[in-house]
Image (cartoon, rainbow, N blue to C red):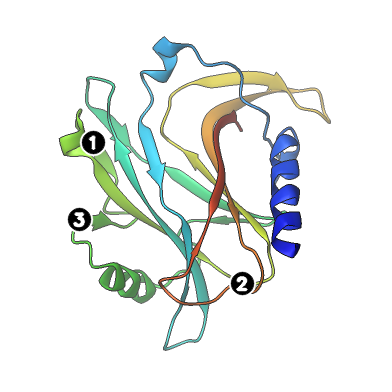
Amino acid sequence: MRYASLVVSALASIALATAFVGGSASAAPSPVAASAAARDLDFDPSELRLFKDAESGKHYWYMTYEVVNKTGSEVRFAPRIDLVVDDGRILAQGEGVPSGVVRSIKSFLGNELLEDQFEILGQVLPGKEHAKSGLVVFRADDLNPTELTVMVQGLSKETEKRPHPKSGEMVTLRKTVRIDYLVPGDPKPRGSMTYPLVNREWIFR
């Protein structure tokens, strides 16, 4: 029953996507024309996992993804990926994450093609055969959240101007992929434990 109530809670929060996230307007996506969508990079994320560093005892959330360029031309990929905790905190990927932790996770996953946030920067050639595989790691300052949201910018050049809900000033929002994860119960710091992706959508943030 508790898990079911968490799912309901997660889906309810998704429906309220017009709330502010860390001072940036996060609104439900406007309809995207097919011609505009065709210029976006495809982003396929994994489920979320929790890693415990044996040396420090600290915990880290991580996920992997594949990015594919179906635009027909070469595209530069320089993503900004943030984690939004259900209490409103925002963490940038790699912020406060030691390089040794990233190496340990990559070694555990055993994927030689997996690239960290710095290695993956650069041009993405068109076609599935040129897909890039990335690793994203965030600090897990506490293990209490039941919902975690990952925001990914850098997949689209599309922007939209909207008035700020508080000041009324026009602000530029960027087309962003929002990915919601559910963390039911007590998270276990085992590399094999996964936490499900419950929603993925385009928004302007």
Q: Which is in the foreground here, disc 2 or disc 3?
A: 3
Q: Which is in the foreground here, disc 3 or disc 1?
A: 3
Q: Nearer the viewer, residue 196 or 34?
A: 196
- Going from N to C along the chain, the mark reached first, 1 or 2, is 1
Q: CA distance from mark 3 to mark 1?
A: 16 Å
* Amino acid type of the residue tagged 3 in the rendering: Leu
In which quadrant will I find the N terminus? bottom right
- Going from N to C along the chain, the mark reached first, 3 or 1, is 3
Q: Furthest residue to the front?
A: 1
Judge the density around disc 3: few (<14), some (14-19), many (≥20) Cα neighbours within 10 Å: few
Q: Is residue 78 left or right of residue 13?
A: left
Q: Furthest residue to the right?
A: 166
Q: Which mark is residue 181?
A: none
- Please say if the residues under marks 1 and 2 sit with CB atoms less than 8 Å apart: no
Q: Quadrant of residue 116?
A: bottom left
Q: Which is in the foreground here, disc 1 or disc 2?
A: 2
How far from the left and from the top, in percent, is residue 158? 48, 21
Residue 144, above or below 152: below
Residue 14, above or below 58: above
Task: Name the residue carrying label 1.
Answer: 123
Q: Nearer the viewer, residue 194 or 127?
A: 194
Q: Secondary structure at mark 2?
A: loop
Task: Name the residue carrying label 3.
Answer: 113
How far from the left and from the top, in percent, is residue 119? 26, 53
Q: Nearer the viewer, residue 51 or 168?
A: 51
Query: Who's the residue at 50% across and 86% down the image?
Result: 57
- Residue 28 in sight from this viewpoint: yes
Task: Name the residue carrying label 2.
Answer: 141
Query: Who's the residue at 29% across and 33% down the image?
Result: 76
